[in-house]
Image: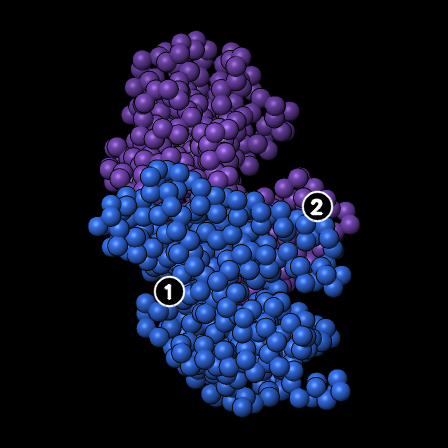
Chain colours: A purple, B blue
Amino acid sequence: MTQLSNTATWTQRPLVRMAQRIGFEPANVDYFVEKLNPVWSLLNLRATVVNVREETHDTKSFELQPNMHWQGISAGQHVGVNVEINGVTHKRRYSLSRAEAVNADESKTIQITVKRVEGGLVSNHLHDHIQAGDVIGLEAADGDFVLPAELPNSLLVLTAGSGITPVFSQVATLLNEGYQGSIEFLHYVRSPADRIFGEQLEALAQQYSNLSVQWCFEAAEGQSKPERFSAKQLAKRVADYQERNAMLCGPAGFMEAVREHWADIGRSDALAFEYFGAPPVDATDAIDANITLKTGKQIQLNAGETLLDSLLENGPNLTADELPKYGCKRGVCHECKCRKTSGAVKNLLTGKVTAGEEDIQLCISAPVSDVTLG
Amino acid sequence: MTKVLTVEQANAFGAELDAVREQQMNNLGERDAKHIRRMIKIQKSLALAGRLLLWFGFMPPMFVVTWPLGVLCLGIAKIMENMEIGHNVMHGQYDWMNDPKLNSQTYDWDTVSDSDGWRYTHNYEHHTYTNIIGKDRDVGYGVLRVSKDQPWEPHHLLNPVSNVLLAAGFDAGVGLHDVQVDEFLKGKVSAKRSWEALKRFARKATRLWGKDYVLFPLLSGPNFLGVIAGNFAANMIRNVWSNMIIMCGHFPGEAQTYEYDESVLETETRGQWYVRQMNGSANIEGGKVFHILSGHLSHQIEHHLFPDVPAHRYPDMAPAVREICEKYGQHYETGPFLKQYGSFLGKIFKYALPTRKQQLAAA
Ligand SMILES: Cc1cc2nc3c(=O)[nH]c(=O)nc-3n(C[C@H](O)[C@H](O)[C@H](O)COP(=O)(O)OP(=O)(O)OC[C@H]3O[C@@H](n4cnc5c(N)ncnc54)[C@H](O)[C@@H]3O)c2cc1C
């Protein structure tokens, strides 16, 4: 079920709660507050876009000034960005892309960097329609892809595409804070023109002798064949890579290859990584699926069943909290509407398959992949 | 008279209606978002204006103007919130917008009926078992006799009086609907269930009546009584209006009621469900403002066929629905407000007395 994710804590104070019990409604007051200035809100985190900068031909950075609900962020973490496109609010996560940990009490800005994804809804909307002065919805910082309290002696960074953003902010923060260990930064990218933060990284390498930056291009002038990740390729670039603690971020395929190799050499625990999203699901037919409930409990669903059928069938094994609310079982009343946090389902009324985080009606949804309900 | 359809005919009828629905659902977007936000803007502005007029308009010469104007603004705001916004949002008509403020499962409407209880008794029970006697508790709301198929009981002699009382206290009536006092007395629902529902009602009523009869009057200081009276009058306007609209939804003219038969329901196809919904509902003709003030329940037929399509689209869908009904020989019950309400009132008087067959059986 959707919740106001940024509900302000002041509404929970005893006096305010008492007032709410006899009819005070913060949301009604907030309605008029945001009419005065769209970034103002008594309840919700939002931000004004203060600057938009072009990083490469397909990547832009957005500098954001959050409103008073901002709680701060650490390098490597990401924020939620909410934008409305054709009446629908879409939410995506974007990593902090600058070298600073902004504390809640500082009125500093934060920066995110967005690469256009071909056919992508939100990335292209941000590129084509969002300008300085606009207000966007934000969701609080989150993520555990952050620097450990105890820093390793030496680091290896492997990034590709827009995966550079969270790692760049961590490395820059480390260096600013006086980290003395050696950092080998390898970025896999299509061509020199596609390098996000190319100049900034080169400048950092000039300034700090313990940082070395290497670019691995698919194609570049004077390069005969593409340079892609492999154990051999990496050993050639960084001879002692197995001794280093590694950080990884990039497209799913690239990350799978790196993680497999780290597992092979028995160093999985020295590899920190973050995915930018699951690979696309292309199943169109109902399958046997694993359903994970919000409590973490898993149930098996047989192909052709709806999520509601399957949950009710498992009823005796489920707690009251895990059992769905439901009504008509025919897609009319919306009583069984539930948040799906991941996986793809087919709507049996429309035949449409949709994936990702969304609300679904359990009684007319048949999974076409494993599904997690929130 | 409406034609009785075979299963195949009903399914074909349903398939055509599905196509009408599909056509609308495929282009949900900006237009619908704009509509509901505009409604909210007008509603909130009217509510604010109404409250301010009632608060500050207590100077003697002004009073005769500001008080009635304040009541009118607030009354219309309450009507819009309950009908065009709350009722429709809670049906899931705007869930696709993914806006937490317009989410059917978390929206809390501005009337003393608890939202969770309402979603169950209205969205599920009433919209699934529409007009099935003994199953749809909206048939007569447990107090009125509106169809010859409802068994006559002595208290139905008071039908006309009950109708007036129900209209005046409609918010409380709807709020207490889920407590199911009548079913509890018959032993059909447990004391626990009724008690839980009553507690939820009490909590909600404290909040809303607290706002209208304590919080806002206190805030207004010397104009305490003026605000109480104004809020009461606004609630009354909302109650009577929404009651009259809703009574026109299923009871006028040839709108049908049904006998309950579990085995029939079990095997009912989507097409047959459409047929039942269609024949159990009645429309009211009117202009755009009238449709909005009725929450588009003036398009009750379209609403019962397509409860989760944004209601402002019903007028666009109606001609196609009507055409399909004609093609399949289905009666499309519609008429101007006075005719439809008059037809309902007629039944209120007529069915206050036992129907002849039952009189004979009793004798
Ligand atoms: C923790 C986290 C941090 C992130 N940080 C950043 C960041 O700093 N910068 C940034 O640009 N993006 C980042 N992303 C990705 C971002 O959230 C969006 O997924 C991305 O912008 C695409 O969204 P879209 O609406 O444009 O595409 P959608 O409309 O969602 O997708 C369109 C198509 O593109 C595919 N697709 C979706 N995402 C990707 C992707 N990342 N790579 C390749 N194909 C994709 C989809 O499967 C689909 O087929 C992050 C994601 C996560 C989970």
The residue under label 1 is B293
The answer to which image quadrant residue A305 occupies is bottom right
Give the position of the C terminus of chain B as an image quadrant: bottom right
Q: Amino acid at mark 2?
A: Ala
Residue depicted at x 33% and y 43%: B223
The numbered mark at residue A320 is 2
Residue depicted at x 31% and y 23%: A108
Q: In this view of the protein, which residue sits in the foreground, B176 or A307?
A: B176
Q: Amino acid at mark 1?
A: Leu
Residue depicted at x 40% and y 11%: A177
SS for tag 1? helix
Image side of residue A156 versus residue A216, left or right: right
Vertically, is B308 above or below A315? below
Q: CA distance from mark 1 to mark 2?
A: 40 Å
Q: Nearer the viewer, mark 1 or mark 2?
A: 1
Vertically, is A297 above or below A288? above
- State the image coordinates of residue A4 (x, y, percent, origin top left): 47, 40
- State the image coordinates of residue B356 (x, y, percent, origin top left): 66, 88
- State the image coordinates of residue B317 (x, y, percent, origin top left): 41, 74
SS for tag 2? loop
